[in-house]
Image (cartoon, coloured by chain):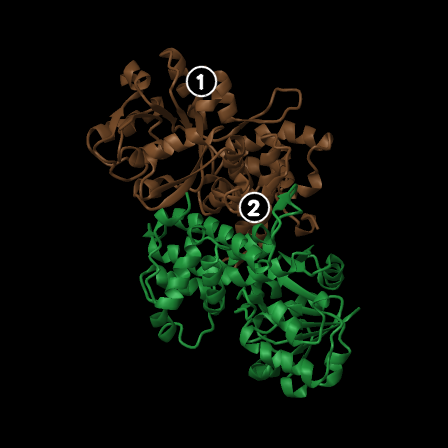
Chain colours: A brown, B green
Amino acid sequence: MAKITVLGAGVMGSALAVPACERNEVTLVGSPIDDSIIRELQAGRHHPTLDVMLPSGILAVRANELQAEHLLQADVIIFGVSSPGIPWALDLLHRFSVRPNMLALVTKGLIAGRAADDTPLTYAQAISQANTNPEARVVGIGGPCIAKELALKIPTRVTFGAHRESVADELRTMLQTDYYRVATTEQFTELEACAALKNFLCIGVSAMIGAYKHDDGYAKNPVAGLFNQAVHEMFTLSRWISNSQESSAIKNSADLPAAFDLPGLGDLHVTVGGGRNSRLGRYLGEGAILQDVMQTTLKGVTVEGVDTGRQLLPGFRKACHDGILHSADLPLTQRILACIENNEPFAFDFCDLPQ
Amino acid sequence: MAKITVLGAGVMGSALAVPACERNEVTLVGSPIDDSIIRELQAGRHHPTLDVMLPSGILAVRANELQAEHLLQADVIIFGVSSPGIPWALDLLHRFSVRPNMLALVTKGLIAGRAADDTPLTYAQAISQANTNPEARVVGIGGPCIAKELALKIPTRVTFGAHRESVADELRTMLQTDYYRVATTEQFTELEACAALKNFLCIGVSAMIGAYKHDDGYAKNPVAGLFNQAVHEMFTLSRWISNSQESSAIKNSADLPAAFDLPGLGDLHVTVGGGRNSRLGRYLGEGAILQDVMQTTLKGVTVEGVDTGRQLLPGFRKACHDGILHSADLPLTQRILACIENNEPFAFDFCDLPQ
């Protein structure tokens, strides 16, 4: 039995506490905006945004009730916040001088690079640099995982990635249950990149749902065509971000690049199925302009794919200019960026797909 | 302008006639069961099963109206029948002693191998052997393509595969339009294998839709998890069927194995979205037994994935026995085969996924 502290009591952090508490002692720490959630949990009621009863074994604490021991004695600290909560979580580690034995990340995103080549960093890379914690003990969590389904113990399968597979294996030993199945990989940065990029690319795939209404639903061919293209562009971009120079020799399905596995095509599959990135995409497909949607229907909503796109932009432009990326191979990325940067209509032309 | 003859006036053959007739002279030949369809088209009415008006330039002829010249003068003959129509189409070629300049195949399936190793053959391989036509001039067509959407000119993207890419390119030059986009590949047998296997594997992925009802819909995580697994198993099986020994070195997204491209994950995406294989899968997911479904709700319906499974079985068992395939890596294939062979419940256990 390990001690696991989850930072952030939103849907994802709270859902992950469910498999985590099967064999471990779990403390779920609300961020300052989670106070009302924690009060409900402390009163023995449903998690209000998940709409699920959490197991009674989970100790729920509000941000201002947090004790140093919750962090210092933890075998694993899990960042379960969404991206705006990252500074709070990092600040906690600094304030209590915590150097976690192991840090696991659910939060995904990119940060525009400041290095000579402008290649964006994943959150994991940025957090490792901000924190005193060595990147070697950081585990990224990717793969299809809608929070509410996990909280209801509906089966899923995800990937834990770390620089050394043995570190990811350690976390798997703690967290894996019959319904929360875990594969492991050493493609740490590729996994983190895919997990961020899927939100961004989902916007373009989901646009096809809005663009081709048909028979009381929507046409399926355009969605499948751009789903395929999104996976390919995720492969190219994740290898660029992770600086994978070598070609991947695929001998069997255990060697697959992250883009062709759970963190890539698997997670993209659920992301297109619903959620905020998909909603934005559907509006764009109907002809809406991104800025208008973000100022009206989705006002105040965090659409992580848009943030990812903004962080991707400078490095992407530079890499295309320098011939490291070939823009003709990345028409979907180009169109989504044009929506984000210039408020252009999405209007994807299938003739722009590479031959 | 080329002369193109499409054999089979069901939904797929007829839909393909739509892009084909944009720049070519197209003859659409009904099989003996298509007489009523052809009569409607000849009377200038909607295609009754597609429920779409076909372009008036398409010449529709009934099976018994067929003239030798429709076949002998064709630059390309397209097999647009579903699998039960293959013997009729092959017989036509024999009867009129036609050795087509180019043969293109929409029909997909496997045929249990009779060679020493029992590896199944694709239809393309079997047809090349049955016909005098050299396999080198046969083009396989794979990728996401719901017939009605194509007939309505909603955009899609497919792959043409041939042993020499120049042959696939020739057909692309004839058929590609703004809405029917075409990639080409030399992975001829892998494409054909994926196109058959996607129907089979779709049954297992779709079972998750039936198995995990949730919130007035269905849970998305299990579907995405098995979608990912299906793509991986399609990769393994298609390489076995095509006898691809070498590892695929993936340098960029133009080199991808067919399973990770339009004929694989792209086509699987639309196939899980609807159709007969998906319907069967949903029933199995709800707990039904395959034989019962096929004798009641789906009585008389051709479910191509079941036929593919039956043809796959002997070779699969032998390859597992001989250590060429590893059954532990193929749990989804195993479960679907158990439903087909032994009428077992589908009941997929996520703990059986490879670690």
The quadrant in which residue B321 appears is bottom left
| Quadrant (top left, top right, bottom left, bottom right) of the N terminus of chain B | bottom right
Q: Does residue B118 appear in the picture of this structure?
A: yes
Residue B19, position as x, y percentages in the image: 68, 65
Q: Chain of mark 1?
A: A
Q: Is residue B71 above or below residue B116?
A: below
Residue at mark 1: A133
- How many angstroms separate mark 1 from mark 2 (CA)? 35 Å
| Quadrant (top left, top right, bottom left, bottom right) of the C terminus of chain B | top left
Apparent side of residue A272 relative to residue A348 in the rendered image (left or right): left
Task: For label 1, count other residues whose C-alpha is less than 10 Å away and answer few (under 14), some (14-19) or many (20+).
Answer: some
The quadrant in which residue A101 appears is top left
- At x 57%, y 28%, the residue is A311
Residue B121, position as x, y percentages in the image: 57, 67
- At x 68%, y 30%, the residue is A319
Per the image, label 2 sits on a secondary structure element best described as loop
N-term mark: 1 or 2: 1
- The residue nearer to you, when weighing A243 against B53, is A243
Q: Is residue B58 above or below residue A207?
A: below
Residue A139, position as x, y percentages in the image: 44, 29
- The residue nearer to you, when weighing B137 against A92, is B137
Number of residue marks: 2
Disc marking residue A200: none
Q: Is residue A198 above or below residue B135?
A: above
- The residue nearer to you, when weighing A59 against A156, is A156
Residue B219, position as x, y percentages in the image: 37, 49
Per the image, label 1 sits on a secondary structure element best described as loop
Q: Are marks 1 and 2 in contact (CB under 8 Å)?
A: no
Comparing labels 1 and 2, the label whose residue is closer to the camera: 2
